[in-house]
Amino acid sequence: MTTTSWAHGVSGDFDDMTKWTADHVPVAGDTALIEAHGSYTVTSSQLNTLADLEMAKTATLDIADHHMVIASGTGSGALAGTIDVMNDTALVLGTASSDTTFKNTGTINVQSGIESDDNAKLQVTGTVTLTGNGDVVLSGFDAVITAASTDAGTLINGSKSSASTISGTGAITDVGAAFAFTNSAKGVIDGNDPAGLTIDLDRTNNSGILEATGEDGILNLEGDIEQTAKGLIKAVQGGSQVDLSDSGPNGEDNALIDGGELFIGKGSFFESVGDPTGIENIIGTSTKTENKGTLQADSGTLLIEANVDNVGTLVAQAGSVLQVVGASTGGQADVDSGGEIQFFDDTGPKTTTNVTFEGGGGILHLTKPADFTGTVTGNLTGGAGVQLGNIAFADNPTLSYNSSRQLLTVTDSHSGVTDTIKIVGTTMFAKTDAVDGTGQVVITGAGPGSPSAPQNSLPLLTQSMASFGASGGVAPSGATSPAGHHGSSDFLTASAAQGHQ
């Protein structure tokens, strides 16, 4: 093995032997030292293979064509300068079936062009660990970090003391070979570009930070993210966004955040893009989920398995379901037309989040209505409704509304259950059967134009109006009540409800 140094601080071709000491171009098994004083660029335009490479801070290695392979690491030095991996080229680190450490204190630029065949690659072979607090910056159409095409690879970003920051636009993915990725406690993966940085692997292990930053930076998480307790996923600046989406090529797999913490800063977004056929994306954070921005289900189902500390807004867009297993405390939740939010309240404190219906057809599903203390606003006509998980539609419950206190009381005389919900903006109510097959009651608005008013509501309205003048109450609907169950009003106006208070 030979150690060869770049002789002078001037630019030149890597394969020009006159630029190296002893007129020897480094080859496989050699150590190359690009550490001459001065600011200069060494250009590699053919396949070159080394054992070790060490670089000075002011030196640049330009991989302009083909590949550069560094098999054994950085020796006693570091990659302190800049390495530019250009269009349709690759920097290959490591050796098959070996553990190799590269100390990167400079910058590795993986710079693709603008066409699909321009992709530049940082490839790993065997197990490669990046240390040194340097940067890996991806840019262009299809810049990737992946395994070498013929060998499986594992990239570990960081040791106990240092790691790289991987940022820009491109992908950490498997292309033609098995690839595993671990972001250590010191590691940072930063989607700081509107074009998006994507982690597209079956599983990513994270003990550090996966983040979207910048005014419009995007981080796409495609596949499972397994986090230790210190692992953190965050969108931290106004306009930045983290997306969680299905990992399979046809959306057949769910995406999972397992453990750690999720944080959405003020003005930032977290969006789940699921499969409308029923595949769930799951947030299973073990530390906490904290939302100061917008946390939304775009399509399919997003299941949040823990409590949500919500200062911002939860959103269920059209065609999506947002489920919170624990409690959602504080903030706002918006149910778009055709969307659904379900609060299970299985753990933790009561849900205090206020819910607004943004259009007809949305559903707020309360599995344990007694644990919901938020306020419901918006017009419940047009198919929107509040589904109560503890009252059966077949029990024909009664409805009463106190307009001064803005409280709707739903009483199931058959089971003895009573639910009270604060509703603002709707004063006329009806009930209907849940469409999900559970047989639960759904409370809808019964104003003009409501397509979800229950059967017999028009005759009942006539009964209610006729009886109101005589008694100040609401005519019973016993004629339409199921046998053995108590009669009730299927249609309620605010003024009639006050007669019951």
Image: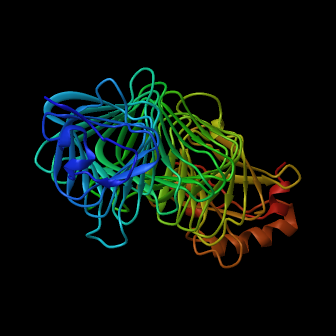
Above or below 444: residue 333 = above
Q: Residue furthest bottom?
A: 449
Residue 279 in sight: no
Q: Nearer the viewer, residue 365 or 499?
A: 365
Q: Residue furthest right?
A: 404
Above or below 467: residue 68 = above
Q: Residue furthest top?
A: 160
Q: Nearer the viewer, residue 426 or 231?
A: 231
Q: Residue at x 29, y 67 (%)?
A: 118
Residue 308, by quadrant, is top right
- The N terminus sits in image quarter: top left
Residue 342 in sight: yes
Residue 58, position in %: x, y?
Answer: 46, 43
Q: Nearer the viewer, residue 473 or 267?
A: 267
Residue 483, position in %: x, y?
Answer: 50, 53
| Coloring applied to the structure | rainbow
Residue 385, position in %: x, y?
Answer: 61, 60
How many numbered circles are shown?
Answer: 0
Q: Nearer the viewer, residue 234 or 27?
A: 27
Q: Residue at x 60, y 53 (%)?
A: 214
Residue 386, by quadrant, is bottom right
Q: Residue at x 59, y 56 (%)?
A: 315
Residue 147, position in %: x, y?
Answer: 21, 45
